[in-house]
Amino acid sequence: MSRMSIEERRAQIVDAAMSIAIREGVEAVTVRGVAAEAGISLGTVHYCFEDKDAMLRAMGHSVALVASDPVRMALDPTQDLYTIAHAAADGLWQGLTPRRHMRLLTFEFATAGSRNRALRPVARAHLEQTWAMTQGILDQLSEIAGITYSMDTPFLARIVAGYIDGIEIAWLVQQDDEATIRSFHALADYVLSLVVHPDGAAPGPVEPAEAS
């Protein structure tokens, strides 16, 4: 059997840590427990990650990447701006339902960091990763459509990420699918209202392109 590369081994360790976090919570993740879960030695875990915090940061990055995948797939450069924005809203919904446990982990990172001083830098890093992912999607939409926003993109990314978190927490508690879908599309309309077109037109509602 061929030996794993360090990248493959790191991914294996992160997967094992995720399994523990989903079952028992983020604060239950330990280097020893992850080694046992993955069926590897403590030395192997320490070889791949300097310490537990480094491993938790990798977990947070993995969660953020997975959450953004369905939205990135919706950014079709052949479509008009309105269609892309609302396809991204559908992507948020499609990515939420099968990844319920992963989204719970996202929020647990935040709450664990607010309670536990040792985890606070990890929670902050995860939050910054989420903002960076959101900004990357907004920047990609801007590039595809050839537009800018009336608000600086880093700040807009914080607002959009905050809205998404609130919508998803409400769904996790209420399980109201219809209200959640409507909320994601209302968020798409909000982003569209901040669009500034190349001709300098002011922000405002963006309607679907007319069929030719």
Image: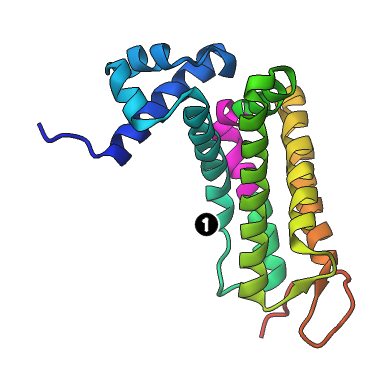
Q: Please name the residue shown 79% across and 52% down the image.
A: 187
Say whether residue 97 is left or right of residue 11: right
Q: Is residue 188 above or below residue 110?
A: below
* Badge 1 density bin: few <14, some 14–19, many ≥20, Cα 10 Å: few
Say whether residue 83 is left or right of residue 188: left
Q: Quadrant of residue 85?
A: bottom right
Q: Confirm whether the magenta stretch covers residue 181.
A: no
Q: Is residue 8 above or below residue 196?
A: above
**In what element is the residue under mark 1?**
helix
What residue occupies the far front of the structure in this picture? Answer: 50
Say whether residue 127 is left or right of residue 19: right
Residue 171 versus residue 29: which sits nearer the camera? 29
| Image coords of residue 25 (percent x, y) | 58, 15
Residue 109 versus residue 51: which sits nearer the camera? 51
| Image coords of residue 51 (percent x, y) | 46, 25
Q: Quadrant of residue 96?
A: top right
Q: Is residue 65 visible?
A: yes
Q: Quadrant of residue 193?
A: bottom right
Question: What's the magenta region?
Answer: 91-103
The type of residue carrying mark 1 is Met
Q: Confirm whether the magenta stretch covers residue 100.
A: yes
| Image coords of residue 134 (percent x, y) | 66, 52
Q: Please name the residue shown 51% across and 42% down the image.
A: 66
Q: Please name the residue shown 89% across and 71% down the image.
A: 204
Q: Please name the residue shown 36% across and 35% down the image.
A: 11
Q: Is residue 206 visible?
A: no
Q: Quadrant of the N terminus?
A: top left
| Residue wearing tag 1 | 73
Magenta stretch, overall SS: helix
